[in-house]
Image (cartoon, rainbow, N blue to C red):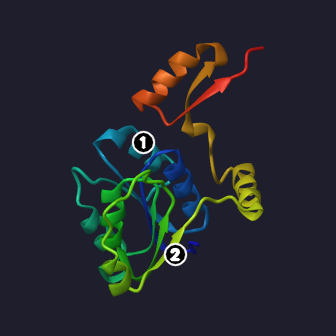
Amino acid sequence: TVAPGDVAIIAGPGAIGLLTLQVVKAAGARAIMLGTDADEHRLALATQLGADAVVNVQRGDAAAVVRDGTIEGLGADVVYECSGAGPAAQQLLTLVRRHGRYVQVGLFGRPVAWDLDQLVYKELTATGTNASTPASWLRALELTGSGKVRTDLLITHEFPVTAWEQGFATFEEKSGIKTIFVPAE
């Protein structure tokens, strides 16, 4: 969970990361979004959705942004790994404060190297989540219904079902965020 006044870092500005960003902001926390060169358009959308800072980790210094944006430069209160990338998970362990919270949201799809000593040294609480409880679905409906979470900005491409090949090609190019198919009328 995230609380008002917390500083949260979200790694991975895909659909899940951008939704996580909006939930963090709705809770009253400050949010820092991390991405890569491939995510420039998604980082721009993160800013539009309320991120207090965005960092392209291939060009910027995430540690400096976190030091400048946290109390006494001690690190983020909570970090969310939404990219499913091992290097992002490892970096988040360096950016979370002592006694902070690490939340794994993204799936790696393979074993990854992870320095679990940091979990012990910093006395972190680590959690995995897939938000599949009835309470989480009700909260999601409340947030979207109130406009605090906007899903419309995440849908970047729409195709009729008959153009499924074009839709899948667009998805594989990773040029959008969410590609959806619309039933034929």
Location of the C terminus by quadrant is top right
- The residue furthest front is 111
x 59%, y 14%: residue: 163
Place of residue 132 in the rendered image (x, y in percent of width and height, measured from the top left):
68, 58
- From what the image shows, is residue 12 above or below residue 102? above
The residue carrying pointer 1 sits among few (fewer than 14), some (14 to 19) or many (20 or more) residues within 10 Å by Cα, namely many
Residue 41, given in percent of the width and then of the height, sits at 39, 38
Q: Which residue bears the numbered disc 1? A: 42
Q: Relative to 33, is 122 above or below?
A: below
Q: Judge whether 57 appears above or below 99 on screen.
A: above
Of the residues shown, which amino acid type is indicated by label 1? Arg
Is 9 positioned to the left or the right of 151 in the image?
left
| Residue in view at x 40 percent, y 53 percent | 110
Identify residue for label 2.
5
Whether residue 61 sits left or right of residue 111 in the image: it is left
The residue lying at 23 percent from left, 50 percent from top is: 58
Residue at (56%, 72%) from the top-left corner?
A: 2
Alpha carbons under labels 1 and 2: distance apart: 25 Å
**Front of the two marks 1 and 2:** 1
Q: Nearer the viewer, residue 57 or 71?
A: 57
Q: Which mark is residue 95?
A: none
Disc 2 on helix, strand or loop?
loop
The crowding category of the residue bearing disc 2, from other C-alpha atoms within 10 Å (few below 14, some 14 to 19, many at least 20), is: few
Tell me the amino acid under the disc marked 2. Answer: Gly
Which one is nearer the viewer's eye here, 68 or 168?
168
- Answer with left or right where residue 45 lies relative to residue 180: left
